[in-house]
Amino acid sequence: MADVVHLTEQLAWILAAGAEAVDAHEAPQARSMLRNLARTVGAGVPLHLAPLADLRIATLQRERLVALSSKVDPHDEGWESIPQLLRRNGSTVPSEDLQRVDRMYERLQQEDHILRHTLPEQCDIDITDNDEREDQPRTFDDWLETAGKLADPTEYRAAWQSLMQTLGVPAETSGEPGHQQWATGADTLSAWIPDGPITGSQISGINADLVICWCGMSDRAAALIESGEAGRTRFVEPYQPLETIAWTVHQHRAGDYPDQELPAVLMMHLREGTDPRLAPPPPYPSGRPIPRPPAATAPPPGDVEPLMPPE
């Protein structure tokens, strides 16, 4: 049994490594699928129960979770979160373990909110080139941290709208609640910032290119999204589009897009979900080739005869 567990851990590691090796430009869905497979194989349970397996509660071992998973359907509207799932009729989980799940779940949700509003790699990139915004966050890191402290969804949406307008991207509210249109020329991106966590009951009715999950999402919603129920809508945490924005601004200031305006480059990367630090796939929007190392110019060693072409 120990050998089987060790084998699955290695397989999960290989799948996770494969996900990072996939070209995000060419196959974003493949990367997502491999990451989900890695998490499922590593936990030994279906994807929607992986968060519960990560809690490492002794009375909720894999065998019990597997038995529980046979009774769970992501399309069942009777649950949204793991604690609700455990309290359904027929659950045999002791009350003290349920309370422990509640406490740990609440703590993890608080930690996740902080992580959603923290850039993985501190970039220290100024939002603008001037010092006129003395009463506003100076860097993108500061902006994200400040946004994470907002509790009112209206203020949170206004912060994103103001940021995009500061960077030269027209951002207007649309008729649907919480929706904004970010547009430059022919490029338009519809973004939805909901009032709170995304729930499973909302998935089928979402009409947006990008959903900024600033309060996270329920476990059932995550399971439905990973099963492909949301179509081509991209669900992101706040740090993800902001990281794209910050490094796009940095690369543009460094001269990587000499024949394009910043708003157009921003929209290109935000629409495609691409990393501006990576070489773009052809055709190259700015006409720049992939950087290549300089050719070697040193003469061959004196004790080595050069190869001669055949006669």
Image (spheres, rainbow, N blue to C red):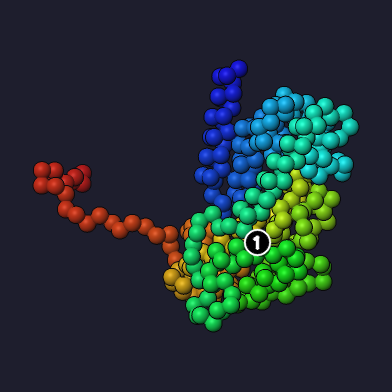
**Where does residue 270 sit, x and y in percent of width and height?**
61, 63
Q: Is residue 81 visible?
A: yes
Residue type at tag 1: Gly
Residue that lies at the very extreme toward the front in this rendered image: 96
- The residue at 44%/72% (across/down) is 255
Q: Which residue sits at x=75%, y=25%?
A: 64
Check disc 1 and report the residue beneath it: 148
Residue closer to the observer: 263 or 299: 263
- Judged left or right of residue 120, residue 198 is right
Residue 92 locus on image (x, y percent): 82, 27
* Quadrant including the N terminus: top right
Q: Does residue 12 sit above or below 219 in this rendering?
A: above
SS at badge 1: helix
Judging depth in this view, the residue of 45 and 96 nearest the camera is 96
- Look at the image and tell me in which quarter the C terminus lies: top left
- Where does residue 60 sit, x and y in percent of width and height? 72, 28
In this rendering, the answer to whether 74 lies above or below 96 is below
- In the picture as drawn, the residue positioned furthest to the top comes out as 1
Q: Residue furthest left?
A: 302
Q: Position of residue 112 (x, y in %)?
A: 65, 50
Image side of residue 90 versus residue 27, left or right: right
Residue lying at 84% horizontally and 50% vertically, measured from the top left: 201
